[in-house]
Image (tube, rainbow, N blue to C red):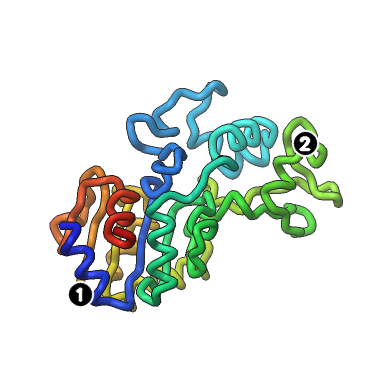
Amino acid sequence: MYDELKKIINESDNIVFFGGAGVSTESGIPDFRSEKGLYKARTEYGRSPEELLDTDFFYHDPKTFYDYYKKNLIATWAKPNDAHRALAELEKRGKLRAVVTQNIDGLHQMAGSETVYELHGSVLRNRCTRCGRKFDLDYIMDEKNCRDGVPYCPCGGLIKPEVVLYGESLDEQCIRSSIRAIQEADVLIIGGTSLVVYPAAGFVHYFNGSKLVVINLSDTGIDDSADVVIRDPIGKVLGEVVFG
């Protein structure tokens, strides 16, 4: 299967990668829905992660929101793994046109990828809810900019992460760019996602190209339609295929 994937990559210069939380687990970032994922764990707050990451809850109780958010969704120590590096290398070689990701950790950009569509936003971007001023992650993590752990703008406005919370819609421009990239791709590689999170997972059905590849530890709903299905860690697969 590895040789077949390498052949597909070598013969194409119009590849799009669609990825999920499994891409970053090899960097030590937990996923959401596996048996050890964040959504399976009981929280110390007496609420489910879905409740804590709801937009209404953010405005109602920003202190509890940020306490959970900073402990569980921020991983300043995380570094790109072989999957991130391999995708950046394929873009550098002129083979990969875009990364469409459900992740919010910014590791694709850290690895060197330039065309990245972040469907669920990014922890690296933050914005004042009053004046619209933008802030990086360092600002919101610096306690001197916070009151009880909640970051505030110099104007006094509450700062909100540019992450798509429950109750919010995906960014329309990001949706259009992602779908266009998938529609125009010759090869679509789906990795590190079981395709259960909608509407993002539905975007793969716009693919009309010649080769569909799935790299995921568990089954997905489109395995039967794929030309290649590999059940190994994605960092191992892409690292060996691209750099091996």
Q: Which residue is mark 1?
A: 210
| x 73%, y 37%: residue | 150
Q: Is residue 227 visible?
A: yes
Q: Nearer the viewer, residue 128 or 239?
A: 239
Residue 217, above or below 114: above
Q: Is residue 116 above or below residue 156?
A: below
Three-letter amino acid code of the residue under disc 2: Glu
> Quadrant where the N terminus lies?
bottom left
The residue located at (18%, 55%) in the rendering is 229
SS for tag 1? loop
Place of residue 120 in the rendered image (x, y in percent of width and height, measured from the top left): 50, 54
Other-residue count near label 2 (Cα within 10 Å), few / some / many at <14 / 14–19 / ≥20: few
Label at residue 143: 2
- Say left or right for 6 vs 120: left
**18, above or below 187, in the image:** above
- The amino acid sitting under disc 1 is Ser
Give the image location of residue 163, x and y in percent: 57, 51
| Image position of 85 (left or right of 243) | right
Furthest-front residue in this view: 244
